[in-house]
Image (cartoon, rainbow, N blue to C red):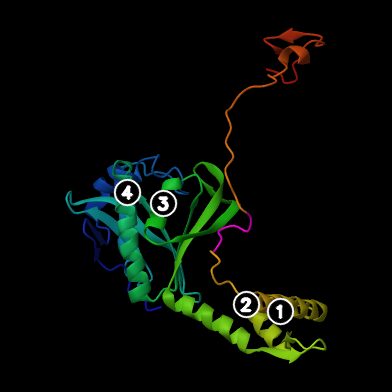
Amino acid sequence: MIHKGTQMLATNRLTLRRFLTEDAEDAFYNWAGDPEVTRYLCEKPQESVESMEALIGQWEQEYDNDRTYRWAIELNELEQCIGIIEAKSVDDQLCSIELESRIGKKYWNRGYTSEGLDEVLRFLMAEVGACRVWAQYDVLNIYAEKAMEHCGMSREGVLKRAGINNTGIVDLGICAQVSAAAAVREEEDEEEISNHVEKVMGEDGKLRNVISDETMEYVGILAKLELSPEETEAAKKDMADMLDYIDQLNELDTTGIEPMSHVFPVHNVFREDVVKNGDGREATLANAPVKKDNGFKVPKTIGE
């Protein structure tokens, strides 16, 4: 990546720029001091305008590093800082940048976050050369995921109990956008594997796929796997069987067959929600030694 630091960016409604000390008051009252805005984050809300001013002072010094990416989201019509987009981590080896954003709650659901993220994604991929820009978020924060999806980031999965924020231990969702160059590289990797697969004639007169040791070594490098000789032989057989099956599927004539979204026909079955047998409460409590409020009364098990 060719790092350029936090450059000024612009959209129809926003200016994305470096933070200034005079942003402290707007930043504090719009988002940084609001516990509701920082609810799903690790950091605590700022305690005062003065503490926000001190934090911005640190940020201003960090702008000297061209690997620092931290934008104040300024709403043009108000000329106020209403939020922030920043890089939480930068991995030069993977050409990967992790983003985090937040915005004042009175500006939620107006598309400002996704509008800003969209321009930041363009800058990081087109000008910095990032191959992957991603973000993690508390899965309960559904609006964060929607904002990322609106700017072209795709959900990749959920990591169970993988993070801690101001609400406690949480499940983390992962959204990312991968550059076209990275997608081309994946296609080239697949083509490289196919070029290493040979076909031999079997005793039944059919061509069958044979996976070479070189191919398995190449796959191991791509997948970062270290296989024992026994595991390698088993994997070679499994891969060959899968390729043979794919060849069989490719021989099928699918002319006039509509693509299916599911292998089985799926139809919703609706019926009226009618109680037939009831809850059987009277029969259930008929032999109860002690009853109270239509339930079993049992001894207390937890003290005061």
- Contact (CB < 8 A) between labels 3 and 1? no
Task: Residue at 75%, 80% (x, y): give it.
Answer: 236
The image shows a total of numbered marks equal to 4
Depth-wise, is mark 4 or mark 1 nearer the camera?
1
How far across and how far down the image is residue 39, in percent?
A: 44, 42
Q: Is residue 262 or residue 14 the one in the foreground?
A: 262
Q: Is residue 294 left or right of residue 23?
A: right
Q: Residues within 10 Å of mark 3 (few under 14, many from 20)?
A: some
Res. 257 in view: yes
Q: Which residues are magenta?
A: 259-264
How far across and how far down the image is residue 110, in percent?
A: 29, 47
Q: Please identify the quadrant where the C terminus is shown.
A: top right
Depth-wise, is mark 3 or mark 4 nearer the camera?
3
Task: Residue at 41%, 45% (x, y): give it.
Answer: 38
Q: Secondary structure at mark 2?
A: helix
Q: According to the image, label 1 marks what residue?
A: 244
- Contact (CB < 8 A) between labels 2 and 1? no
Which circle's residue, 2 or 4, is located before the other in the chain? Answer: 4
Q: According to the image, label 4 marks what residue?
A: 52
How far across and how far down the image is residue 95, in percent?
A: 46, 74
Q: According to the image, label 2 marks what residue?
A: 250
- What number is the disc on residue 57? none
Between the residue at mark 3 and the residue at mark 2, the CA separation in whole angstroms equals 38 Å
Question: In the figure, 212 relative to 54: above or below?
Answer: below
Q: Label 3 sits on what residue type?
A: Lys
Which circle's residue, 3 or 4, is located before the other in the chain? Answer: 4
Depth-wise, is mark 3 or mark 2 nearer the camera?
2
Between the residue at mark 2 and the residue at mark 1, the CA separation in whole angstroms equals 10 Å
